[in-house]
Amino acid sequence: MQKVREFLTSDLFNIIMFVLAAVIICIDQMLGTPVYYGLSVLFGFLTFAVLMLTDDFISVLCPGLLLMSFVIQYKNSYDAYMHYMWGAPILGFAFLFHIFISRKKFEFKKPKDLKLFWPYVAASVAMILGGVGIMTSAEYFAKINIVNAILLGPFALLLYVVLSGVTGPGKNYTEHMDERISKVFITVAVFLIFAVFEYYAEHWSKFVSDPNILQFQWRNNACTLLMIAMPFSFYMAKKKHFAYIFVAIMSCVAFVLSGSRGGLVFGAIEFLILLIYFAKKDEAHRKYYIGILSLGVVAVAAVALKFSSMLSNTFERFVSYKENFRRLGLWQRSVEDFKANPIFGRGVGYQGNRDLHPSKIGALCWYHSSLPQVWGSMGIAGILAYGYRFVSVVRTFAKRTDLFSKTVFLSFIGLELMSLVNPGIFAPAYLFIITILFVIAEQYEFDL
């Protein structure tokens, strides 16, 4: 088992997971979506198997993120995946097996030793109290409200505490945790870039007949994951080999090809921030960063002139009322919802705005921006709690001097930027990802 667990931390394991995930999205084109759903569930079972085999939760990160990266590619997939709900007990069994059989000794950390404990507590309280005073009992205890409130509040806190107790030097079969985590996110970024190009290959005839950006429905989720992952390419470019920077450059290409307005704008902002920051920190490659910035300006000008027609649909969506009236309307509704219950807001599971945003089965009726999500769902309590957590994260990472912790912080900033126009930090999966990164940065000391 020791050798198996060490293998699950290796680069080869990540490569195998990447190949399997890539095969699945390619099979979708050849054999059709029913096979795709079955294979994605099979990949999920493989992830559960990894969870059972190891006592190191980080080993589940790569297959878990890859699973997430191709599950996002299907809209209205709720009913399709409901056919596989018989697998839910297997997931539960895998978690219990991981905790009680393949367990690692838990080291209880006092709240004073966890920099973000109280900020997570504050956010949890605000999330649970969201809607109190205006929601009926049936609305508050509706599955969609109570499940999401628990996942985004107490469960995220529990995840932070538990993972802090099983993470640290000598506990995760890894001598260089910074490199291991960076390679996981680079693997996910390369997969998403591949997925974007595979989509264009799959719809090549449509693209040739009408050379415009193919705006697939999973574009915002793909760009969110890419923005979380992009700082780690810069980190590895400094620490190991500058060639890693091409993953970040290709991520920018994926932003453009995705048709995501948020990815295009905030992805470019994040890339610029990373270029400037690492040009300052990485003196050995500073001239290359300056060269990339210069070429980037030329490339943007060339694309704007030569390929403006291909990008016309994306640009038009920035100013189109048809494309933006829902988001503008939801911002207005968030103010109305705040006024309706200023202390605790409407609650995260509030369904009263479905006339503007008819969310799919099992999905929250988002305000599509983190700021109105805070004041609309949780009122003044949410503003204070989430403001406290954000400031605490900034202060915590400002005190860290190692580059990996700064990279994690830049990943957090990327998520927060994208969250301004997409659920982001209020989607449980993304919150869990950034929480895992917080734990690793806090529990390890890094040389670089």
Image: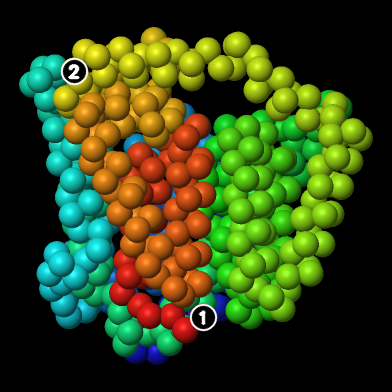
**Quarter where residue 189 is shown:** bottom right
Residue 53 appears in view = no
The image shows residue 97 at horizontal and vertical percentages of 20, 69
Camera-nearest residue between 310 and 218:
310
Q: Which residue is mark 1?
A: 448
Q: Residues within 10 Å of mark 2 (few under 14, many from 20)?
A: many
Camera-nearest residue between 357 and 22:
357
Q: How many marks?
A: 2
**Quarter where residue 57 is shown:** bottom left
Q: Looking at the rendered structure, which numbered label has been put on residue 165?
A: none
Q: Residues within 10 Å of mark 1 (few under 14, many from 20)?
A: few
The image shows residue 332 at horizontal and vertical percentages of 40, 14
Left or right: where 135 falls relative to 297: left
Q: Amino acid at mark 2?
A: Asn
Q: Amino acid at mark 1?
A: Leu
Q: Residue at x 45, y 59 (%)?
A: 409
Q: Quadrant of the N terminus?
A: bottom left
Upstream in sequence: badge 2 or badge 1:
2
Q: Looking at the rendered structure, which numbered label has been put on residue 341?
A: 2
Residue 367 appears in view = yes
* SS at circle 2: loop
Q: Residue at x 64, y 52 (%)?
A: 271
